[in-house]
Image: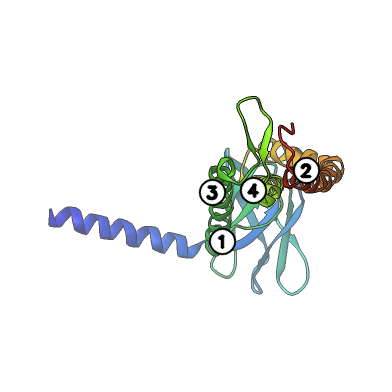
Amino acid sequence: MKLNYLLVIVLVFSFTLVSSQLADLGTTKLDNEFTFSQFCDDATYITLSSIKTPSGIVNVNTNMTATNSGEYTYNYTPTEIGRYDFRGISDGCENTFSTYIMVTYTGLSLEMPQTVMYIVILFFLIGILGYIIYIYPRLPQNAVNDDGYVINATQLAYLRPIALGVMWILILSITYIVANIAVAYIQAGFLGNFIFGIWMIMMTANFLIIPLWIIYMINDAFKQAKLKEFLERGGNDFQ
């Protein structure tokens, strides 16, 4: 048992040591050419040996272009989402190098604080939407008899169309957050584009939905006032 614990510790230490030797180049955008640079003042050449892409290893074995002040560059265009490891050798500095860069659909990196924030906001909005859906059937509405005629009007009936509007806004917000996360971080780029396309259709539909919703609320409030006045005068069976 102690031997197993010792082996685990050695493996963790080795992994940590190897990871620490890999320099993080940050994040770049898919299908966007970027310049990979290495600096070494006392080198006469730096050779890029290989690039490990998300789908495999590409053997490059080419000398990087020397520029000013010991800088060597290599232009590369990533075509897949994921991590790219660059490995090479030189006749100076540390003789070998290993660096990596992350490629996302938009060139943005997802940090842990951002992840937590997105998840919290998403679940918060979903929770509000679920609660409104739950209470919607319980909101005040005009009392009707068995024949469908209004026998009592309530002033709080306007809450129902407002609740519908809030639900639509929440659905738009949830779709927007999911679409942006999918576009930025899901490897299948078409999925993010599809969700974002749905959101764009929903936003375009607002040019029709919002005016109709406002007209409906104004008409409903006017009708509600007339109905209440009618019933207070002793009228009944208003459908």
Task: Identify the mark nearer the N-term, 2 or 1.
Answer: 1
Give the residue at x 40% y 62%. 16
Q: What mark, if any, has residue 174 been given in the picture?
A: 4
Residue behind mark 2: 230
Residue mark closest to the camera, 2 vs 3: 2
Task: Identify the mark nearer the N-term, 1 or 3.
Answer: 1
Question: Dot 3: within a 10 Å radius of its alpha carbon, few (fewer than 14), some, or many (20 or more) residues?
Answer: few
Question: Dot 1: within a 10 Å radius of its alpha carbon, few (fewer than 14), some, or many (20 or more) residues?
Answer: few
Of 117 and 93, nearer the camera is 117
Give the residue at x 33% y 62%. 13
Q: Amino acid at mark 3?
A: Tyr
Q: Is residue 74 above or below residue 227?
A: below
For the residues labelled 4 and 1, the Cα–Cα distance comes to 14 Å
Residue behind mark 1: 117
Residue behind mark 3: 131
Of 48 and 124, nearer the camera is 124
